[in-house]
């Protein structure tokens, strides 16, 4: 290996994982530490998925991870999810939350109108945690720290396309700038923190299916997540984890072009397809365990066209507006016929669906804060909780489609963020964190994407610090200094 080294650490990606790694490494380092953060977009578009998400955090007021999270992930993955990874996440979440707060990110706990299971298996209306200002706050606060540190180079409009290796050890990365010119950057360690392949329709088609082109990105930032981490890692012998054919999709307002225009509150009403027929049990589970399945179903089985239908009872649930993130209010009408006409549904078909639903509901008391057992009988499908008759105008509707958030499959890593080969051995000099790493199989238990990005971004920094101290070039530099 050449005696030249441009950096101690190169981080590919400017989201929560990459910035957490950069800040942690700089704070653990010394005056000679050198870090590069590569971001394929211009500065104003930086941050990938992190910059656009509301960033729910699956924690309580003591910053503890939901104690049931590991069990749910094990069950939904048929035991395939790495439980050592999950246990490490649980242990590190409190310090990760403290890390964010210590660097200027305020975490608030706000009321949410519908029961969730972010704090165990029993539904709860406990306030939901998220950064004030969403994920953008993380990008702005951590990004400022990195930009202002003279030991760090933030290279915008720089795309990493190939890892450099020497006898199996990753020693740097080949990059391409906005002018098309290529360059080689050498480093003791490289961290892949540039997301999954949700922004690359060729890879989505390969792994997810030929209708992947119909999945719009939920936010502009994920267009930059083009599978670079997965592709480059596979080229040097890395293994994968998670389902490469799995995606996290969410039901969003079809009228809106705003980022993250999600309808979480679909359980207070019914969901119908383009024929105005119900197609799912809207009360089968709490919204956090159902919204991904609803989104996927709309895309896979309903031609990207569905409608949420509610009424005044739905709209009057306290804080209902916080469950609907669109910039466009629901369509409303004093009659079901008028509502159907306003959104382009057949009026008689919608009236028939609503009347059949109303007639099938029981007399159980409605309680949006728990599984209330208020259900229908005799419908296909029945609604098993929160089945309130739609009888109180104004009637409301939101046209829906599914949008893709991220992909399940990615690079396989250990708890130290080291990328593993197909034989299960660490690839020297190569680390990965965040959504570039695979974890999920049949389901994404939500509100953990940002948390795992911060936890394992920081772990990557610690591993890189140890490599720097042990690396021959670092020892050579220390000897010269002495």
Image (cartoon, helix red, strand yellow):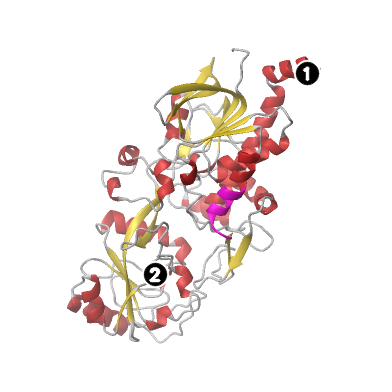
Foreground residue among 311 and 332: 332
Q: Left or right: 125 with respect to 304?
A: right
Disc 2 versus disc 1: nearer the observer? 1
Per the image, the residue denoted by label 1 is: 481
Question: Visible in this render: residue 48?
Answer: no
- Determine the image quadrant of residue 390: bottom left
Callouts 2 and 1 close, C-beta under 8 Å: no
Secondary structure type for disc 1: helix
N-term mark: 2 or 1: 2
Q: Which residues are magenta?
A: 132-141
Q: Position of residue 337 (x, y in %)?
A: 22, 81
- Determine the image quadrant of residue 394: bottom left
Per the image, the residue denoted by label 2 is: 266
Q: Position of residue 140 (x, y in %)?
A: 57, 49
Callout 1: few (<14), some (14-19), or many (20+) C-alpha neighbours within 10 Å? few
Image: 255 above or below 4: below
Image: 73 above or below 125: above
């Amino acid at each position: 290996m050449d005696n030249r080294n441009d950096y101690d650490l190169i981080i590919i990606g400017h989201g929560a994982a990459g910035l957490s790694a950069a800040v942690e490494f700089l704070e653990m380092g010394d005056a000679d530490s050198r870090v590069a953060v590569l971001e394929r977009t211009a500065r104003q578009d930086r941050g990938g998925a992190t910059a656009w998400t509301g960033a729910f955090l699956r924690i309580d007021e003591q910053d503890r991870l939901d104690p049931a999270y590991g069990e749910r992930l094990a069950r939904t993955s048929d035991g395939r999810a790495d439980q050592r990874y999950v246990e490490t996440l649980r242990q590190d979440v409190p310090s990760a939350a403290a890390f964010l707060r210590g660097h200027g990110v305020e975490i608030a706990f706000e009321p949410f109108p519908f029961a969730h299971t972010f704090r165990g298996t029993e539904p709860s209306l406990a306030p939901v945690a998220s950064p004030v200002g969403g994920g953008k706050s993380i990008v702005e606060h951590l990004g400022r720290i990195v930009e202002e540190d003279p030991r760090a180079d933030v290279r915008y409009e720089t795309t990493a396309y190939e890892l450099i290796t020497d006898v199996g050890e990753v020693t740097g990365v080949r990059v391409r700038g906005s002018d098309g010119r290529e360059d080689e950057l050498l480093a003791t360690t490289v961290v892949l923190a540039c997301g999954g392949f949700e922004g690359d329709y060729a890879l989505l088609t390969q792994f997810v299916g030929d209708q992947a082109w119909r999945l719009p990105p939920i936010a502009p930032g994920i267009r930059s997540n083009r599978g670079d981490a997965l592709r480059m890692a596979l080229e040097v012998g890395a293994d994968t984890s998670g389902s490469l054919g799995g995606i996290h999709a969410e039901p969003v307002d079809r009228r809106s072009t705003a980022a993250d225009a999600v309808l979480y509150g679909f359980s207070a009403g019914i969901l119908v397809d383009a024929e105005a027929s119900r197609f799912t049990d809207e009360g089968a589970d709490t919204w956090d365990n159902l919204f991904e399945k609803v989104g996927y179903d709309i895309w896979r089985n309903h031609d990207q066209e569905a409608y949420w239908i509610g009424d005044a009872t739905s709209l009057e649930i306290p804080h209902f507006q916080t469950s609907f993130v669109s910039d466009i209010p629901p369509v409303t009408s004093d009659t079901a016929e008028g509502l159907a006409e306003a959104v382009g549904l057949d009026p008689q078909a919608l009236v028939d669906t609503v009347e059949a639903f109303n007639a099938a509901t029981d007399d159980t008391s409605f309680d949006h804060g728990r599984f209330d057992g208020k259900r229908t009988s005799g419908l296909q499908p029945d609604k098993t909780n929160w089945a309130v008759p739609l009888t109180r105008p104004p009637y409301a509707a939101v046209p829906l489609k599914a949008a893709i958030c991220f992909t399940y499959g990615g690079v396989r890593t250990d708890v130290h963020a080291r990328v593993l080969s197909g034989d299960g051995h660490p690839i020297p000099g190569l680390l990965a964190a965040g959504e570039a790493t695979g974890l999920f199989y049949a389901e994404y238990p939500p509100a953990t994407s940002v948390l795992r990005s911060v936890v394992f971004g920081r772990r990557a920094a610690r591993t890189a610090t140890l490599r720097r101290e042990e690396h021959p070039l670092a020892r050579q530099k220390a000897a010269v200094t002495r």
